Amino acid sequence: MLLLKVKQMVVEYGEKLVEKGLVVATWGNISARNGEEEVFVITPSGMEYTKLEPEDIVEVDLDGKPLATGRKPSVETPVHAAIYRARPDVRAIVHTHSINASACAAARVEIPCIMEDMAAMVGGAVKVAKYAPSGSQELARNVVEALGDRNAVLLANHGVVAVGKNLEEAFKVSLVVEKSAEIFFKSKILGNPVSLTEGEVELIRNFYLNSYGQK
Ligand SMILES: [Zn+2]
C-alpha cells in the first residue's frame, strides 16, 4: 500500500476511535504495517485525533525508530514494534483506554471467553499483561507474552491492545473486547458468566477464519 494511503487510513481510524468513545483526548494510539514488513506507521505522541493529518503520522522501523524527521511517534511505539516483531500475521494495532475493558485491566481480571463473537475475533479469553510503566521495553515484553497468538490483551492499570490482519479488523476487535467486558459485568449481576470451552472456541474461530462472510 502506498505510504500516503496507509497514513490516511490511520487518520480515519483515529476519528472512529473518538466517535465510538474508545479513547479520551489524545490517549490511545493506532499503527499499521506499510507494505514492507520492516516498517510501520503510527500516530504521533500527544496530538488530538480529530486534528491529525496524514503527514502527522510517523513512519518507524521495527525497533520503533522514526525513519524521517517530523512528529515524535506515540510513547507506546515499543509495544507496537514488539508485537510486529513477534507476530508476522499482525498488520495493524489499535490501543484504546475504553472504559469497561480498562476496568478489567484495573482489577487485573482477564475477560473470559463468554461470547461467540469474542471467540471468533479474539480466539479466547483476553489475558492481562503484567504491569510495567507506559512506554517501557518491559511493558512491550509483557504485552507480547500475554497476547500470545490471540488478537487482544489487557495492559494492567492501563487499557487494551487489539490486533488484526488490517485496520478494519483491529478496530473491530477493540469494539468486541469492550462489548465483551460490559457483558461480563452485566452477566455477573445475573449469576456466573459461563465461558465457552476450548473446543467450542476453536470451532467458532476456525469457522470465522475459513467459512464466515462472502468469498
Ligand atoms: Zn495507553
Image (cartoon, rainbow, N blue to C red):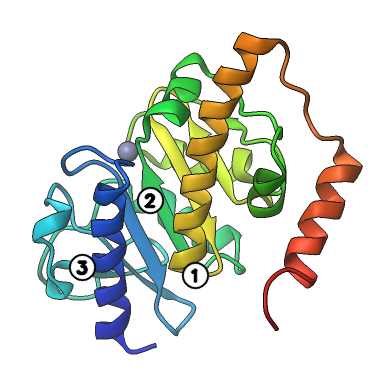
Q: Residues within 10 Å of mark 2 (few under 14, many from 20)?
A: many
Give the mark, 2 or 1, whose residue is nearer the N terminus.
Answer: 2
Instruction: Tell me the residue that label 1 is attached to.
Output: 166
Q: Position of residue 131 (x, y in %)?
A: 46, 25
- In terms of image quadrants, where is residue 99? top left
Label 2 element class = helix
Q: Position of residue 90 (x, y in %)?
A: 55, 65
Instruction: Tell me the residue that label 3 is attached to.
Output: 57
Q: Amino acid at mark 2?
A: Pro
- Front residue of 121/109: it is 121
**Dot in front, 3 or 2:** 3
Instruction: Tell me the residue that label 2 is attached to.
Output: 78
Q: Amino acid at mark 1?
A: Asn
Give the mark, 3 or 1, whose residue is nearer the N terminus.
Answer: 3
Q: Is residue 143 left or right of residue 10?
A: right
Q: Give the quarter the ligand 1 occupies.
A: top left
Work out which residue is located at the far front of the displayed protein and give it. Answer: 190
